[in-house]
């Protein structure tokens, strides 16, 4: 229904920045909120930030002030600007889309993930 492709991950030194992108394709008109989640080795996947199609944002409390989520509806793309990165930010970052299709219900689509590694 909706395909998500993340990009922008990589290796960065402590204090550096990265910008992740997630491009949606398919039935993009059915997308409501989009967001970023992350999963570190041995840990559960956790919320990073979400943004509605109206631009309302929500962040994990611990990441406020360092991470910024934004969305370009014309390009069907959501971004995550990550500043002042720390080793504990090392994780696979996943893009998620919440989808609503009339008469069919609500669905969730996930991207394949992009690795972010922060070294000291």
Image: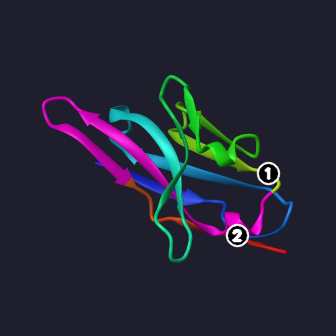
Residue 30 is left or right of residue 20, and the answer is left
Going by the picture, which residue comes out furthest to the front?
61
Q: Are marks 1 and 2 in contact (CB under 8 Å)?
A: no
Q: Position of residue 79 (x, y in %)?
A: 62, 45
Q: Which residue is mark 1?
A: 83
Question: How many numbered discs sit on the rendered protein?
Answer: 2
Foreground mark, 1 or 2, reads 1
Q: Position of residue 56 (x, y in %)?
A: 55, 26
Residue at screen point 50% across, 44% down: 35
Q: Position of residue 110 (x, y in %)?
A: 40, 56
Judge the density around disc 1: few (<14), some (14-19), many (≥20) Cα neighbours within 10 Å: some
Mark 1 or 2, nearer chain start? 2
Which stretch appears magenta? 85-109
Residue 29 disc label: none
Q: Secondary structure at mark 1?
A: loop
Residue 10 disc label: 2
Q: How is the image coloured?
A: rainbow
Residue at screen point 85% across, 75% down: 120
Label 1 to label 2, Cα distance in Å?
Answer: 14 Å
Q: Is residue 1 above or below residue 55?
A: below
Magenta span dominant secondary structure:
strand
Q: Secondary structure at mark 2?
A: strand
Q: Position of residue 32 (x, y in %)?
A: 39, 32
Judge the density around disc 2: few (<14), some (14-19), many (≥20) Cα neighbours within 10 Å: some
Going by the picture, which residue comes out furthest to the left?
103
Residue 47 belongs to the span the image colors magenta: no
Residue 97 belongs to the span the image colors magenta: yes
Q: Quadrant of residue 98 in the image?
A: top left
Residue at screen point 80% across, 56% down: 17
Q: Is residue 46 above or below residue 76?
A: below
Residue 91 is left or right of residue 102, and the answer is right
């Amino acid at each position: 229904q909706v395909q998500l492709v993340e990009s922008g991950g990589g290796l960065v030194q402590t204090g550096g920045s990265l910008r992740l992108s997630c491009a949606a394709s398919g039935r993009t008109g059915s997308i409501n909120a989009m967001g970023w989640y992350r999963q570190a080795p041995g840990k559960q996947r956790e919320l990073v930030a979400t943004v509605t199609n109206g631009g309302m944002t929500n962040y994990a409390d611990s990441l406020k002030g360092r991470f910024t989520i934004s969305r370009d509806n014309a390009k069907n793309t959501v971004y995550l600007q990550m500043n002042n990165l720390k080793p504990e930010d090392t994780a696979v970052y996943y893009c998620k889309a919440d989808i609503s299709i009339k008469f069919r219900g609500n669905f969730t689509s996930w991207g394949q993930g992009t690795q972010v590694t922060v070294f000291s």
